Amino acid sequence: MAYGIRPSLPRVEVMLYLLEHRTHPNVDTIYKDLLPKIPSLSKTTVYNTVQRLSEKGAILRLTIDEKNVCFDGISEPHPHFLCKKCGKIYDLNFVPKANIQLDFSEHLIDEVSLYYRGICKECLEKMK
Amino acid sequence: MAYGIRPSLPRVEVMLYLLEHRTHPNVDTIYKDLLPKIPSLSKTTVYNTVQRLSEKGAILRLTIDEKNVCFDGISEPHPHFLCKKCGKIYDLNFVPKANIQLDFSEHLIDEVSLYYRGICKECLEKMK
DNA sequence: TTCATATTTGTAATCAATACATTATTTTGT
DNA sequence: ACAAAATAATGTATTGATTACAAATATGAA
């Protein structure tokens, strides 16, 4: 695995899981889904793993859902949308224009998050 | 109090507190700081109050700090910066250009958050 | 005043996240 | 290959923010 992370079994599996499941899962979901495949897995390991992966820039850590932190296997920065009704998190596939990356303060910025919230298309359909 | 919120004592005091303290406090901080002034205050009331104030649009609910939710008495949307070293949250006083408000999906968007993270100017100074 | 509604309070419970000690695995140097 | 050192995984216990809920209080309308 790249990003200077030793490719242990849990790390590889969590990374693959996040690349294959674009649902922006939280730790508990990742843990429950991987447990059948890795019966020895502990939840602490999943916490350690997403911590390591995100600090190395291999995955995105999302704080869009105030209940818990979620993760995205695509580490290229992009906006996200949280549906307040069904709770699903969607990728918004447009690149924020450069202006929002500009540093107007004098802080050293190394992360930008752009979060949208509202009612998703699917829930809007159901409400008609 | 505007926004269709009945101006009870806790609500007025929390609102004033947030307008006067631009530190983006969490519930616990608001509670501890108001307790001397309102000895009967309960933390549940602070939770209820910030919930009500934010859902009515009187304050901003920030999920920039993954430890806990913070609040901003200025409800006009604006970007925020979290220092990973000292934990302080700063207002970034520029208005995100219109393009980031554009709805490229078909979801109904009613909230936009723009969060920056890194090391603040003050901490950078200290590290020199 | 009296009833209905809204608000506040306090306690108990939930649950994500962390701390920490133990065990297991991998790497490095010899 | 072997031993020592470093890294990683595991499990348990704990913390701490948040919510649930029921009881008490305050407010507003008739």
Image (cartoon, coloured by chain):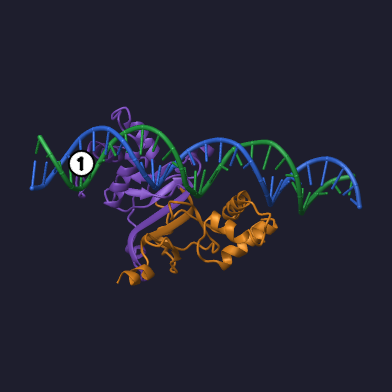
Chain colours: A orange, B purple, C green, D blue
Residue designated by label 1: B7
Q: Is residue D10 left or right of residue D3?
A: left
The front one of A104 and A53 is A53
Asked if residue A5 can be seen in this view, the reply is yes
Task: Give the image location of residue B15, x and y in percent.
Answer: 27, 41
The front one of A111 and A62 is A62
Quarter of the rendering occupied by the N terminus of chain A: bottom right
Asked if residue A105 can be seen in this view, the reply is no
- Give the chain letter at badge 1: B
Q: Secondary structure at mark 1?
A: loop
Task: Give the image location of residue A114, x and y in percent.
Answer: 42, 58
Q: Residue at x 37, y 59 (%)?
A: A84
Q: Is residue A88 left or right of residue A36?
A: left
Quarter of the rendering occupied by the C terminus of chain A: bottom left
Circle 1 Cα neighbour tier, 10 Å, few/some/many (<14 / 14–19 / ≥20): few
The front one of B43 and A49 is B43
The front one of B78 and A50 is A50
Kind of residue at badge 1: Pro
Q: Quadrant of residue A9?
A: bottom right
Task: Give the image location of residue A125, x and y in percent.
Answer: 34, 72
Q: Residue at x 29, y 50 (%)?
A: B75
Residue B65, placed above or below residue B105: above
Q: Is residue A72 left or right of residue B8?
A: right
Q: Residue at x 50, y 56 (%)?
A: A70
Q: Residue at x 62, y 60 (%)?
A: A34
| Number of numbered discs | 1
Q: Quadrant of residue D14?
A: top right
